[in-house]
Image (cartoon, rainbow, N blue to C red):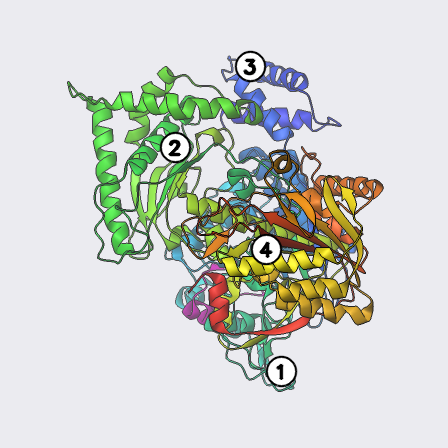
């Protein structure tokens, strides 16, 4: 351990006694005391950057972490952890904590949060000492690149300490991802390099990570797989290995989701532990060996995408053929009398759509997380999609508006070089200026990190522009040529050439890096570097960079662990770079590959994660279209997590949550389109949700028809109230709202605002005395009224609302650029001031629980508003939109959009509708 790391560790130890977050002055005092102590102990001056250490400690102690929310089912579960906690020797766990503190420099709040969250998971598994049969299935939902591997490594440590004997980690679909996962478990759990020797042996093992922490006794665990690229499970190697599953010592296996590997593992496990034939079922079963299966990236490869078969009463027929990987995972679990399965994923859409009653006689239950779902909070230093791209205030999901980071650079010059639609024969022309600039940005970021004392850190750049490996090969050659030219010019100079490379770097520094770093300096404790310092290090930084092709045909690997002085790499690839694989210290990303699949797009965001001390140097080069899609799916993902939080507060079960998401009008179903291979009956509920028109026809006849329907409704309503310059009517009968919706034609692509389904849903609730009375509000834009941009509707003059058209070139549709019509505070116009204050207070409490800072604006949480609304009372907001600036529309009549806010109901009646595969693919954007 070097002087700097030792000083940081000691300062953190001294600060543990502080009752509250220490001030800069207290940190400064502790730093000076530690440096004085080290100087005295070592008999020499300890030369470290004191200001850098103070800033890092400040950052660490200010990290906050919220509390995870949990959906539980106690069915078949016997609580146990609190009773056994004091008698368990938490040796693996305590060693792992010391490793995170001393070697990885984790913040105290993050380690405390990890301890709490791993306990939350462990106590929902079964006591490994409990006799008899038990089977637990759960899911842990985290953000992309947020530390899920660290979480399940901690869970493995605790599970082994508690008595689990066999741990199987399903680590993605590729050798590189499996190898990377095993390296992490070698470092955090095993403590030795599994490539050297797989069994624990103090003489033969090469100790790494947690294994280098002195604790006074050996911690014995074995691995039947290794971190080598070819170290996946092999039955021949396992038979020679000499350690049987279910013995005295715990055994871990890290395997990829491959049918051949899983089949061999299944047969070996049954034969090695002498599974016995169960007399009742005739199946071979392993008894007395508690099994824990951790499924990393559980939405990828593990899902059964074959269609289920139902009888005439809509009951699942068990004679069903699951997909191979899904079947083998289930058979493995089904063959152990005592098993626990924990799915980890950042994109749980597909997992939630697993039918909770799906099972077969051969494979047992499907992988629906029936026992628990845990929503992991992220530490405040996590840089996720909301922070990178920013968000518009969204009433549906209760999201507050936020600014994105100034690190996104839009690419507009790529189409000729890499067309969106291209074939494997495509030969890219000269690389675009944007990619050349991205490569220079990467070199510059490496140089600045060296100047900041991060000379031994890894540095990664991602180039992800095509799925086709043959085209990736050509791109790699081009990037190598550019890099080689830059390296040569930085080393030998440009002579008398008119275009000087160092001038280009300086211009990039002054126009991009300097202003970006200055704008982020105070919030992110950025260490300043001057141009002269960076300039001196450009050659050193560039010379270290390698090009690596990461795909199924290339032999390159991202062997970060082999580079103790840091690996600097430009990784060029496709699918292998988009699923689970971590690019260490990723600074620059050049990403063009389009997809509209929610889960795939989010998983491709390798640039999310933690960027301590260099966030200002990160750059994402991508297209405006992809930025808009990321904003869109960020809202969808946040809504899913918020729905989980709400239902956890109501003590709902995972089955309740699965049903709720599947019936939600917004869908959140994009990933499930491939499961809808035959006509499927779906249920739909609008409880505690919004229905909002965000897409309109550019058709004068339809728009005039909708205007007429609105005009006729308003003329029947009588006396109004004025609320914030808007017109408001209370106690409007449901019949009038139904008549309006029946006369209104919504756009067929705006599924949440399908008026036919809305009418069916409202009618279904009336017998239960729900949605019988409505508040109708006609929105008037006050500024537009002052500017005389008005129109008379229903006898009332209103200022017209403006919403930008993101499909301005389309002659057929008007699509709102921000994907929402509602202004968040419009949703509570009919509520009292006291109720509004209560909603704001509850909104703030929710933020605090999630570990978020106080609200910057008084933006209410839409779901809380709907909870406070009486279930008998719905809200209909009418927005007359200015059509004069919308291309292809000639009628002067305003386009009328509507928003419907539905109260929370625990007894509403969902409606059924049938969807075929073609319709689902249309909704998913696949056709």
Q: What is the number of the mark on residue 776?
A: none
Q: Are marks 2 and 4 in contact (CB under 8 Å)?
A: no
The magenta segment is: 244-266
Q: From where the camera sits, is residue 190 visible? A: no
- Mark 1 burial class by Cα count in 10 Å: few <14, some 14-19, many 20+: few
* Mark 1: secondary structure: loop
Per the image, the residue denoted by label 1 is 278
Disc 3/disc 2 C-alpha distance (Å)? 26 Å
Q: Which quadrant, please, contains the C terminus? A: bottom left
Q: Residue at x 64, y 75 (%)?
A: 357
Who comes first in sequence, dot 2 or dot 4?
A: 2
* Image quadrant where residue 667 sits: bottom right
Q: Is residue 27 visible?
A: yes
Residue depicted at x 50% and y 63%: 923
Q: Sequence-wise, which precedes: disc 1 or disc 4?
A: 1
Mark 2 — residue? 565
Which residue corresponds to mark 4? 693
Total labels: the figure holds 4
User: Is 690 positioned to the left or the right of 521 in the image?
Assistant: right
Query: Mark 3 or mark 1: which comes first in sequence?
Result: 3
- Residue at image position (40%, 58%) is 174
Check disc 3 and report its element: helix, strand or loop.
Answer: helix
Upstream in sequence: badge 4 or badge 3? 3
Is residue 163 left or right of 573 when viewed as pictured?
Answer: right
Residue marked by disc 3: 39
Q: Secondary structure at mark 2?
A: loop
């Amino acid at each position: 351990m070097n002087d700097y790391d030792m000083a940081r560790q000691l300062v953190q130890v001294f600060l543990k006694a502080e009752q509250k977050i220490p001030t800069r002055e207290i940190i400064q005092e502790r730093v000076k005391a530690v440096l004085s102590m080290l100087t005295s102990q070592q008999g020499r001056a300890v030369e470290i950057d004191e200001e850098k250490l103070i800033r890092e400690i400040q950052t660490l102690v200010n990290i906050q972490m919220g509390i995870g929310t949990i959906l539980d089912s106690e069915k078949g579960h016997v609580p146990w952890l609190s009773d056994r906690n004091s008698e368990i020797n938490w040796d693996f766990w305590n060693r792992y904590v010391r490793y995170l503190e001393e070697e990885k420099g984790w913040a105290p709040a993050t380690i405390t949060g990890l301890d709490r969250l791993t306990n939350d998971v462990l106590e929902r598994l079964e006591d490994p000492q409990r006799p008899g049969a038990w089977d637990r299935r759960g899911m842990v939902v985290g953000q992309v690149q947020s530390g899920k591997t660290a979480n399940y490594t901690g869970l493995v440590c605790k599970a082994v300490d508690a008595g689990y004997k066999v741990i199987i980690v399903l680590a993605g679909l590729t050798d590189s991802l499996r190898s990377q996962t095993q390296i992490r478990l070698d470092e955090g759990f095993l403590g030795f390099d599994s490539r050297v020797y797989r069994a624990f042996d103090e003489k033969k093992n090469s100790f790494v990570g947690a294994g280098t922490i002195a604790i006074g006794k050996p911690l014995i665990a074995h691995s039947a797989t290794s971190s080598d690229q070819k170290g996946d499970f092999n039955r021949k190697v396992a038979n020679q290995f000499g350690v049987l599953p279910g013995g005295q010592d715990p055994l871990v296996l890290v395997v990829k989701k491959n049918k051949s590997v899983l089949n061999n593992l299944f047969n070996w496990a049954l034969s090695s532990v002498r599974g016995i034939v169960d007399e009742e079922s005739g199946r071979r079963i392993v008894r007395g060996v508690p099994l824990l299966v951790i499924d990393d990236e559980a939405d990828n490869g593990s899902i059964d995408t074959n269609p289920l078969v139902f009888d005439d009463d809509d009951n699942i027929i068990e004679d069903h053929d699951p997909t191979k990987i899904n079947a083998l995972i289930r058979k493995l679990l089904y063959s152990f009398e005592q098993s626990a399965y924990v799915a980890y994923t950042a994109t749980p859409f597909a997992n939630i759509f697993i039918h909770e009653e799906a099972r077969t006689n051969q494979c047992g239950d499907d992988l629906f997380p029936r026992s628990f779902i845990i929503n992991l909070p992220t530490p405040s230093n996590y840089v996720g999609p909301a922070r990178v791209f920013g968000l518009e205030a969204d009433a549906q999901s209760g999201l507050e508006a936020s600014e994105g980071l100034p690190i996104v650079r839009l690419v507009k010059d790529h189409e000729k070089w890499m067309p969106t639609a291209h074939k494997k024969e495509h030969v890219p022309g000269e690389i675009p200026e944007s990619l050349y600039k991205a490569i220079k940005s990467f070199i510059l970021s490496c140089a600045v990190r060296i100047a900041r004392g991060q000379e031994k850190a890894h540095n990664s750049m991602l180039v992800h522009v095509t799925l086709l490996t043959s085209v990736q090969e050509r791109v790699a050659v081009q990037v190598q040529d550019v890099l080689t030219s830059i390296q040569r010019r930085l080393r030998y100079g440009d002579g008398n050439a008119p275009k000087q490379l160092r001038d280009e770097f300086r211009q990039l520094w002054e126009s991009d890096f300097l202003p970006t770093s200055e704008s982020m300096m105070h919030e992110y404790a950025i260490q300043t570097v001057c141009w002269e310092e960076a300039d001196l290090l450009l050659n050193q930084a560039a010379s270290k960079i390698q090009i690596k092709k990461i795909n199924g045909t290339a032999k390159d690997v991202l062997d970060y662990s082999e580079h103790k002085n840091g690996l600097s790499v430009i990784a060029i690839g496709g699918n292998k770079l988009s699923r689970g694989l971590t690019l260490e210290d990723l600074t620059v990303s050049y990403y063009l590959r389009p997809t509209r699949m929610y889960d795939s797009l989010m998983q491709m965001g390798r640039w999310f994660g933690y960027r301590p001390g260099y966030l200002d140097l990160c750059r994402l080069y991508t297209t405006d279209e992809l930025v808009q899609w990321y904003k869109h799916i960020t809202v969808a993902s946040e809504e899913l997590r918020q729905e989980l939080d709400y239902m956890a507060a109501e003590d709902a079960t995972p089955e309740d949550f699965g049903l709720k998401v599947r019936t939600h009008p917004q869908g959140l179903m994009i990933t499930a389109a491939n499961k809808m291979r035959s006509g499927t009956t779906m249920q739909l509920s609008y409880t505690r949700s919004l229905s909002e028109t965000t897409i309109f026809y550019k058709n004068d006849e339809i728009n005039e028809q909708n205007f007429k329907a609105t005009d006729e409704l308003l003329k029947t309503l009588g006396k109004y109230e004025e609320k914030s310059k808007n017109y408001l009517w209370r106690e409007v009968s449901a019949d009038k709202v139904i008549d309006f919706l029946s006369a209104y034609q919504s756009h067929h692509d705006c599924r949440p605002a399908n008026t036919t389904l809305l009418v069916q849903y409202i009618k279904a609730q009336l017998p239960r005395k729900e949605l019988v009375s409505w508040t109708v509000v006609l929105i008037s834009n006050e500024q537009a009224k002052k500017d005389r941009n008005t129109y008379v509707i229903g006898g009332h003059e209103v200022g017209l609302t403006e919403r930008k058209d993101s499909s301005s070139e389309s002659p057929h549709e008007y699509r709102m650029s921000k994907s929402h019509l509602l202004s968040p505070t419009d949703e509570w116009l009919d509520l009292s001031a006291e109720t509004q204050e209560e909603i704001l207070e509850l909104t703030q409490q929710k933020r605090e629980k999630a570990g978020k800072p106080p609200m910057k604006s008084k933006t209410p949480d839409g779901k809380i508003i709907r909870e406070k609304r009486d279930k008998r009372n719905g809200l209909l907001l009418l927005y007359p939109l200015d059509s004069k600036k919308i291309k292809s529309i000639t009628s002067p009549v305003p386009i009328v959009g509507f928003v419907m806010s539905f109260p929370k109901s625990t007894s509403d009646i969902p409606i059924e509708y049938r969807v075929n595969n073609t319709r689902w693919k249309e909704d998913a954007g696949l056709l």
